[in-house]
Amino acid sequence: MNGALVVVSHPDPASLNHALAKVVVDAWESLGFKTRFVDLHALGFDPVMSPEEARGCATDDAKVQEQIALLVKSVLVGVVHPNCWGSPPAMMKGWMDRVFAPGAAYAFAKGEDDGRAPKGLLRDKRALVLNTSNTTGAREQEAFGDPLERIWRDCLLGYCGFERVDRQVYRVVANSTKEERRDWLADAGLRAIKLAGQPIRP
């Protein structure tokens, strides 16, 4: 399995987020990974769960089914999005809700959800999470505690069995210089290559 998936959620295709995603795609493809790029806005991805999905039933949405298949068969997963009120933007959150589905991303013993920890089904996978922010790192920690770190590393990817997660925040975007953005893009490429080159298990 040498597939890779890069998902970006930002409405502007000329955004820094899209540029970061492209760098990751290029890095993984240069290493021989067949990499699928998904722009959720361009795809018109519907972030709203159906009543059936909310009850744990399989989706009948073809776009969601395709995303689930891509997630399952990819050994490398990259996600890129801005920090929106301490959480992913709505379209990315909907992708998380609908694509990391029961039976595909996690399962409970004997199919019973009684609040205990599930079995993560997405083993032997690595993730690169890149976020952009207009909040300084010091203020993020002091005032908010970096909720995106817990969301991605613990509440979603770790919960579903990912073996390795690398996350980086590029900030402050609003007043960044061309030189800073160039350095951020270079850093993203190096992180992508390093993550892909690491063995899954130490």
Image (cartoon, rainbow, N blue to C red):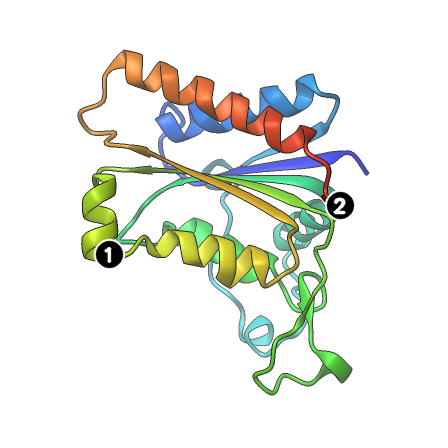
- The residue closer to the viewer here, 162 or 54, is 162
Question: Which element type, helix, strand or loop, lies under badge 1?
Answer: helix
Taking the spot 45% from the left edge, 17% from the top edge, the residue there is 186
Task: Residue 137: name its quadrant.
Answer: top left
User: From the image, which quarter does the N terminus lie in?
Assistant: top right
* Disc 2 packing (10 Å; few <14; some 14–19; many ≥20): some
Residue at 28% x, 32% y is 171
Hey, what amino acid is under mark 2? Answer: Lys
Residue 56 versus residue 178 in the image, above or below:
below
Q: Earlier in the sequence, mark 1 or mark 2?
A: 2
Q: Residue furthest right?
A: 1
Neighbours of disc 1 within 10 Å: few (<14), some (14-19), many (20+):
few
- Secondary structure of residue under mark 2: helix
Is residue 13 or residue 144 the one in the foreground?
A: 144
Residue 18 in view of the camera: yes
Q: What residue do we see at 74% from left, 35% from top? A: 3
Residue 180 as seen in the image, left or right of residue 198: left
Q: Residue at x 67, y 61 (%)?
A: 105
Q: Disc 1, disc 2: CB below 8 Å?
A: no
Residue 51's disc number: none
Specify the quadrant of the image occupied by residue 122.
bottom right
Q: CA distance from mark 1 to mark 2?
A: 35 Å
Is 141 drawn above or below residue 155 in the view shown?
above
The quarter of the picture where the C terminus appears is top right
Residue 100 percent coordinates (x, y): 60, 59
- Residue most toward the top? 179
* Residue 191: percent from left, percent from top: 53, 28
Q: Is residue 191 above or below residue 64?
A: above
Residue highlighted by disc 2:
73
Q: Position of residue 107 (x, y in %)?
A: 70, 72
